[in-house]
Image: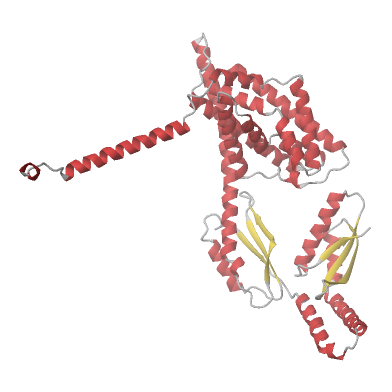
């Protein structure tokens, strides 16, 4: 009993040391777990990886015919607006081989491999663009499909897709037992072939801006896939190419470094430019969400989001243009408040805010008038035929009123000056119903001059419709093409 009374108990200092020891052990186990989870060097086969990448660099024989077939498949898929066909062309395209070869050669200081990769890559690109140009130039159907237009304006997401796709591709190629599904997935995600086909399309239809935008996207994909290859090979510490002549080795090392730097500089510039536009558009959307999108109209005014134009141009000046339709106009003091709010956004301080004010839009009043007339006379109408007759008479009178409210002479004069493709222009009011209510829709009929293809005619009609909707402050205006 006395032994227990005098037994030494652990002090608080001893407890603190044990806690620190346990914490260090937990931290060490966590670091070990993360290392084992993310470590890739031990399962890498440098020799097999290098051999497989070198085997994909040459461009002759079977590879050239595979490339030509993939170009035609991608061109047909883009022309037909078929995503499935475009994906198939991506999977069989051999363009990825020389790009990986360039990244590998820069990483291991192999100038001969770099020379071969650049040569084959250049031949592939020229052949792809030439074949796509001939296809779209000779093929009778050359509509501007959404699949084509999607390749003309790359943004920050395309940069990220190319870089992380390149990382996944090289890591998969370096693993012992290559992961084929990753290679196929990267081929689809980075999409090297469709931009080159779009370059040929833009040149074939005489729109160089389409070609420049698509080539810009292809350049982004090429640079960032090559950069990702370079970084992964460096991290995996692939053996460098050795030269017996030390001076030659140093010269090759400097040259490879300069080429690598030359590749990364435009990549950084491209990334910065695309990032600036992306951040600008993000702030512009936030500004609209904080101002005009939450503005409460007292009457029947409304903000038309489809007509909003967010234009980014660092050289000529950026602007934000919004359209307000309806009878109610936004007071000037409110617009000045919006401009002050705009100045609080760092990227919008010097951006011009344009507010297109609406005018009187009486389409709702027209419907209310017909509905009230029907309700007032419903008690006097004994038969269904009598009701239809009265409604037809009143709708006809309402049509005359609507025709008189359209400044057709002014519209005709402005259309003659602004749209040289219009041969004739007509106007009428169309009565439509969903069997629960009647509505009057202002309809313009245009006949276009000869010489335009179907896509151009559709684009011209849509352009005229958007102009009339803004000009007449009526989003229900419709434009139809007549033969």
In the current view of this chain or complex, which residue is farthest to the top? 244
Determine if residue 248 is in view: yes
Residue 252 placed where, x, y %? 54, 17
Q: Quadrant of residue 444?
A: bottom right
* Image quadrant occupied by the N terminus: top left
At a point 59% along the width and 57% down the height, the residue shown is 284
In the rendered view, tell whether residue 42 sits above or below residue 460. above
Q: Quadrant of residue 84?
A: top right
At a point 87% along the width and 79% down the height, the residue shown is 395
Residue 399 placed where, x, y %? 87, 77
Foreground residue among 117 and 423: 117
Foreground residue among 48 and 254: 48
Foreground residue among 304 and 356: 304
Foreground residue among 402 and 376: 376
The number of discs equals 0
Q: Is residue 240 left or right of residue 444?
A: left
Q: Is residue 22 left or right of residue 440?
A: left
At a point 86% along the width and 56% down the height, the residue shown is 420
In the rendered view, tell whether residue 239 sits above or below residue 81. above
């Amino acid at each position: 009993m006395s032994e227990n009374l005098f037994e030494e108990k652990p002090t608080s200092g001893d407890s603190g040391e044990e806690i620190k020891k346990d914490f260090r052990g937990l931290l060490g186990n966590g670091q070990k777990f993360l290392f084992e989870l993310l470590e890739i060097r031990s399962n890498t086969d440098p020799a097999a990886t290098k051999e497989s990448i070198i085997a994909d660099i040459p461009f002759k024989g079977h590879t050239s015919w595979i490339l030509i077939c993939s170009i035609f498949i991608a061109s047909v898929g883009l022309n037909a607006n078929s995503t499935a066909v475009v994906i198939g062309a991506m999977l069989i395209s051999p363009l990825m081989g020389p790009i990986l070869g360039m990244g590998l050669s820069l990483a291991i200081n192999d100038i001969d491999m770099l020379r071969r990769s650049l040569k084959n890559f250049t031949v592939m690109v020229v052949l792809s663009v030439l074949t796509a140009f001939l296809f779209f130039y000779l093929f009778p159907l050359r509509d501007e499909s959404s699949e084509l237009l999607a390749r003309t304006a790359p943004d920050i997401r395309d940069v990220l897709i190319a870089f992380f796709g390149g990382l996944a591709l090289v890591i998969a190629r370096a693993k012992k037992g290559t992961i084929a599904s990753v290679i196929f997935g990267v081929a689809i995600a980075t999409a090297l072939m469709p931009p080159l086909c779009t370059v040929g399309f833009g040149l074939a239809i005489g729109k160089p801006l389409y070609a420049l935008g698509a080539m810009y996207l292809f350049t982004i994909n090429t640079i960032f896939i090559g950069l990702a290859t370079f970084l992964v090979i460096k991290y995996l510490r692939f053996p460098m190419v050795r030269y017996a002549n030390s001076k030659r080795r140093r010269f090759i090392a400097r040259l490879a470094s300069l080429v690598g730097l030359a590749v990364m500089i435009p990549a950084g510039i491209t990334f910065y430019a695309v990032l600036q536009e992306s951040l600008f558009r993000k702030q512009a959307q936030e500004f609209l969400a904080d101002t005009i999108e939450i503005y409460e109209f007292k009457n029947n005014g409304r903000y038309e989001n489809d007509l909003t134009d967010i234009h980014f141009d660092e050289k000529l000046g950026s602007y934000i243009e919004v359209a307000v339709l309806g009878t109610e106009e936004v007071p000037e003091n409110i617009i000045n408040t919006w401009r002050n709010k705009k100045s609080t956004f760092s990227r919008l301080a010097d951006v011009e805010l344009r507010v297109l004010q609406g005018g009187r839009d009486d389409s709702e009043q027209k419907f209310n008038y017909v509905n009230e007339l029907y309700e007032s006379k419903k008690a006097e109408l004994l038969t269904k035929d009598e009701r239809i007759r009265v409604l037809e008479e009143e709708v006809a009178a309402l049509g005359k009123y609507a025709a008189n409210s359209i400044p057709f002479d002014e519209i005709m004069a402005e259309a003659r000056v602004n749209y040289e493709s219009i041969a004739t222009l007509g106007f009428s009011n169309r009565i439509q119903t969903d069997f629960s209510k009647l509505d009057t829709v202002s309809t313009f009929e245009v006949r276009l001059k000869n010489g335009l293809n179907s896509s151009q005619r559709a684009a011209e009609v849509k352009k005229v419709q958007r102009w009339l909707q803004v000009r007449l402050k009526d989003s229900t205006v419709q434009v139809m093409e007549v033969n």
